[in-house]
Amino acid sequence: MASEVFKGIPVSAGIAIGRTYFLNREAGTSIVRINIVPEQVPQETARLKQGFNAAFEELEVIARKVPRDLKEQAAIIDSHIMILRDEKFQKAACDYVNSRLINAEWALENAVSDIEKAFSRIEDEYIRSRTQDVRLVAGRVRSKLYGQSKSYDTKPERMILLAHDLSPADTIELKLDRIMAFATTTGGKTSHAGIIGRSLQIPAIVGAEGLEEIQDDDVVILDGFSGKLIVDPDAEELTHYTDLKQRFSEYYSQIKRNCYLPAETIDGYQMQVLANIELFEEVTSVIDNGGEGIGLYRTEYSFLNRGNWPSEEELYEEYRDMASIVYPQKVVFRTLDLGADKISPHLGPLEEVNPALGLRAIRFCQQNLGLFKAQLRAILRASTLGNVSVMFPMISGLQELQEVKKIYFDVREEMRKEGLPFNDDVPFGIMVELPSAVFIADVLAREVDFFSIGTNDLIQYSLGIDRTNRYVSYLYQPLHPAILRSIKYVVDAGHEAGIEVNVCGEVAADPYCVPILMGMQLDSLSLNPQAIPGIKRIIRQTTMEECKDLLKQVLSCSHVQQCNRLVREKIFTRFPEELMFYTSLIEES
Amino acid sequence: MDTAEDNICETTISLHNEFGLHARPAGKIAKAAQQFEARIKIGFDGREVDAKSILDILSLAAPNGSALRIQAQGNDARHAVEHLKNIFRENLREDG
């Protein structure tokens, strides 16, 4: 029998071969209405009650296990318990069994729909979105109705976990030593599940549609490099992947051993390799993987997943702790980049036709001055050790930049008057991620201390494509001549003005792109911490001379496929052994 | 007639929570209300719901600054109203 392959987005590297287990399989399936006879009513209502009780007991256990520092998750789980214990909910479901003579599952679904209907009158987006909590609770009850136990808990061998999504409660509940890898049907590169996978260092893929078709206990290969999940692999595939897995683990331990060595080319050109992080906790993996500081701290996380804005004090404590942990290395705080796909739940989505072109990032901050200033104050207050930089996202022009600068200097002035200490020389930088900023990079360079090129957004805005949109994602081409010229232009304009230039998009973690960026003589790269050891190793094996040569060749290409082919050939012949352990943004042609 | 049933206590408070009565404060109130025997109702905007039910409270969708009426009926009505009043006043702030 031919093996079946599911394709998802790789979010955590590695290979796992094992048997599957689908977590809460029923949660995403359709619910069936079954008519019952009056004699069955007691049995069905008893099932419902047992379901509610079992779900309650399970949540109580989870609530006790929530680590203390996860206050937010604890509060969510608490309110789920309250919803579960709400007698009205259970009674409504039981009443449906009785009055309509239907099965427990369908009755539960009706009760949830009623609540949703009641909530739909609510104009407040935030409260209305809480019906989602009711759905989640109902899903937990439903899984109990089917009598599914968390059987991966008792299986002797480690499982490959499949799920629709992994929620905060799931991740606390998971017996992680029983899971060797996981795959979810939903989610993208930045979803919570991906962060979990990387921090646990187990292979993971997300957004793999159709996984529901896989039976529990099927043997699968999960390829965290390419995002493939192969069901019922044949002998040849098994041999190939067993071998790959073995070689990867050898390779991985080797690059990990050397990750603290500087990223210096054979001919002595040194590149600073920094980390992009999103969660405070990731700082440990920066240190573990030989990161030389934090080139991009995405500060959004503390503003998301909560019902209110964090206070200045709260932010200050977080930023101060971050700065002192990485000291003497630096940390670059990027100010709030909310909007587009990152929406605070209590703010609710704005009604925008085009969120990516809408009120986001710096624009959002300028219109929410109180919040913006609180963050700037917190960053400045955390700067006293001298290793803090501040960076502003989505700058589109000089006037905008000058307005932001004025706000920043006003904040400093206020703090000075209040006698609050801060470092006078905090480097002030901007993200260059809009084509407009690229073209006036020479003008902007005179106003700032450093540039960081955000290639993910730059590619999207330059090529006019949303890479999460599957109809056009094939157009996402990092080596498009327009992109290469843009990056080159910004680097040159920055250096002309005597400022440092960094690249912090995903291309910085792509082994095929890094040599080209090197050829531009960037000052630093910033990438996800797990990719640092591998990228440092590649840098250490190249020479600046060959990187410059490669750059010259790709810049002379007018066709993106020509660039891709050239780069794949050159780099692959250079590192044939290790490149199989990497995923690349560069399409195979 | 049971005299306890006549024991009615009522007060009006104003809600101070930036995001209104969402799941977390609603949970706190329902939890507190459940400790009492009295029947407790919360009224807002012409509607009245059971204070012991988080779902009921959520369905009020009361925004910040709303005037809420708390009414309790039963033996410990007075105590219940006082207690809930305190919770609204002291406990629903979320900064920290």
Image (spheres, coloured by chain):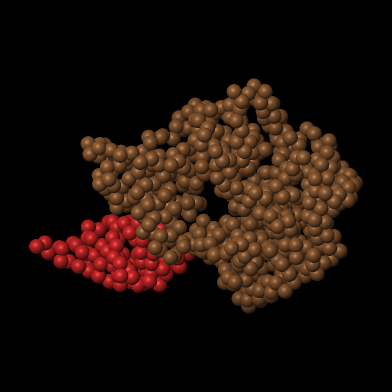
Question: Where, by quadrant of the figure, is residue A303 drawn?
Answer: bottom right
Vertical placement of A308 versus A2: above or below? below
Asked whether, in this view, residue A565 is left or right of residue A143, the answer is: right
- Judging depth in this view, the residue of A197 and A433 nearest the camera is A433
Q: Could you tell me which residue is drawn at 40 percent across and 51 percent down?
A: A134
How many marks do you count on the picture? 0
Name the spot of residue B63 as percent of width and height, x first: 41, 68
Taking the view exactly as shown, the residue that stands out farthest to the left is B1
Asked whether, in this view, residue A342 is left or right of residue B39, the answer is: right
The red chain is B
- Judging depth in this view, the residue of A345 and A263 nearest the camera is A345
Vertical placement of A181 versus A437: above or below? above
Q: Could you tell me which residue is drawn at 44 percent across and 32 percent down?
A: A151
Chain A's shade in the image?
Answer: brown
Is residue B91 visible to us here? no
Is residue B12 visible to us here? yes
- Judging depth in this view, the residue of B21 and A6 nearest the camera is A6
- Judging depth in this view, the residue of A529 and A323 nearest the camera is A529
Asked whether, in this view, residue A539 is left or right of residue A41, the answer is: right
Name the spot of residue A244 as percent of width and height, x first: 69, 29
Vertical placement of B57 versus B13: above or below? above
Name the spot of residue A445 as percent of width and height, x first: 80, 66
Name the spot of residue B77 as percent of width and height, x first: 22, 64
Q: Could you tell me which residue is drawn at 52 percent across and 34 percent down?
A: A213
Q: Quadrant of the C terminus of chain A?
A: top right
Taking the view exactly as shown, the residue that stands out farthest to the bottom is A417
Question: Where, by quadrant of the figure, is residue B2 drawn?
Answer: bottom left
Taking the view exactly as shown, the residue that stands out farthest to the top is A235
Q: Could you tell me which residue is drawn at 40 percent across and 39 percent down?
A: A143
Q: Quadrant of the N terminus of chain A?
A: top right
